[in-house]
Amino acid sequence: MATVYPPTRTVPLIHQLVMLIAIGSFAASASAQTTVTLSTPGTQVNADLTIQGGAAGYTDFSNSPVLASKVGASEGTNRRIFLKFDTQNNIPANAVIQSAQLYLVLATANSGENRPFTAFNVTQSFVTGQTNWYYFRSGQAWNNRGGDLGGNFGTTYVGSSVGSAYAFDLTDLVQRAVNGEFGSRYTRVALIDTGANTSGNYREFNSSRAGDPSVRPRLVITYGSGSAPPPAPAPPPPAPPPPSSGTTLRVMQYNIHKTMGSDGVCSPDRITDTIIAQNVQVASLNEVNFYSGTCAYSFDMSETLRSLMQQKTGVTWYKQAVNPNGVGNVLLSSLPLVSASSFMLDGGRGVAQVGVVVNGRTVNLFSTHIEYDNASLRPTQLAEAIGWLWNFSEPRVFMGDFNTWQDTPDYYTVTNAYLDGWLMATNAGTASSFNGSGATEGLSRIDYIFLSPNLVSVNSVTVPDTVVNGVRPSDHDPIVASLTIR
């Protein structure tokens, strides 16, 4: 499983849970914070390059369009990735770093295995055009061949999703850099595959020389004031639960394809119009980009969607997101949240959770997107997700793009514990679909609203036609359920 939290910031395969219990508004953001994206080659990205041992040990790879990694049988075939960002001139000294995420877009993967990329501080000030396996600048040799490395700043597992942005959490490293702890306030990092030598471990990421600017490396930093905030006062007594919203809850499951419609245009407006047209209170959204991809290279799409929903409806909307590798799942709710959390799954996937009060009960809702490319990961991810859901009380509503079909082993893994909302409505004669089949992607029904068997019943489930002026807002259609909470 992949996530990163202080102090060690180790990412996958450790189950980690972040539970944020809401007393006030989950939509509120921290005060006085600034987000900066360092992505301009030469000025903001001072260096990004590969070094390689052996016969290529003196080769300058700083003009390559890719950054290469390899664990070889000997030093001569090892390849490592080095990057340097100008946090000295772009981030105030001693700023409080709230988040620093490095995004690299995968260009090549020689296998489907997940490779452990560990981030290390580089202790020497290396220079573009002069750095190789033996030297960090002309005439100045590394003390250790292959680079002088400092502390370990966490591990991110990189799979085989070519074209996807993988996120490396460098918050601790950037904080120490801007504090001047390394002698310079530039952020210097080496990304090294610390796994075993296997035949398929070779990976390439796009460098700052890539022809498409949207796939180049970028370091997204959010910082606050120049000093740490004072200790928070003792919390007030817990607030009473929000008022009930009646007995009915309308929910939507929708893979929004990063907001890219059938016309190839990215449009958060069309997505929010689609959600609003269905009059839902909670929406589960998949393929929502966070500072990655063509549709949201420089911003958080989940926050854009939440803000648009609020502007268009005049109602406060709340959100919870999980973004394993720059793209993930979001729950949007017009009902106040009594809890919100997220959980990371093996293979760079995740689950988002919110709790809302309906008919005096806390309803726990979840959003996930199960693996598409590597079917062997699905059973593991489903088992992990279902196991985590048991931590929450019923009724539970488990939504997502499960990339599986009815009457398959993966489907039965879920339906052993949950009911398929579409089938419940079909059996009751209250299911409807513009295409007549309930399919949500092409001819396939792979988006589901699953329900725990207690305290919830299905009024209706529909797959609406979302085409407006000949354009479909996503490559999926949403599925909408009206539920009664007992």
Image (spheres, rainbow, N blue to C red):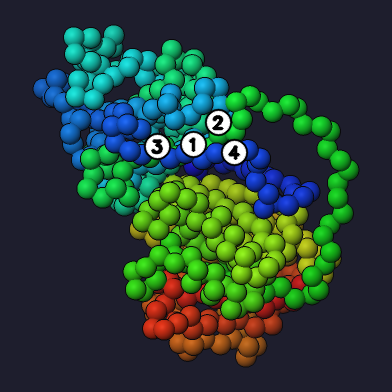
How far apart are the two marked residues, 3 and 2, measured between alpha carbons?
14 Å
How far apart are the two marked residues, 1 and 4, measured between alpha carbons?
10 Å
| Residue position for label 4 | 33
| Residue position for label 1 | 221
Contact (Cβ within 8 Å) of mark 2 with mark 4: no
Judged left or right of residue 305, residue 108 is left
The disc, 3 or 4, on the residue closer to the chain's N-terminal end is 4
SS class, disc 3: strand
Identified at 68% across, 45% down, the residue is 19
Residue 249 x/y as whole percent: 71, 73
How far apart are the two marked residues, 2 and 4, measured between alpha carbons?
9 Å
Contact (Cβ within 8 Å) of mark 3 with mark 2: no
Q: Residues within 10 Å of mark 4 (few under 14, many from 20)?
A: few
SS class, disc 1: strand
Residue 411 x/y as whole percent: 50, 68
How far apart are the two marked residues, 1 and 3, measured between alpha carbons?
8 Å
SS class, disc 2: strand
Contact (Cβ within 8 Å) of mark 1 with mark 3: yes
Identified at 38% across, 47% down, the residue is 165
Nearest the eye: 388 or 120: 120
| Quadrant, the C terminus | bottom right
The disc, 2 or 1, on the residue closer to the chain's N-terminal end is 2
Residue 97 tag number? 2
| Residue position for label 3 | 38
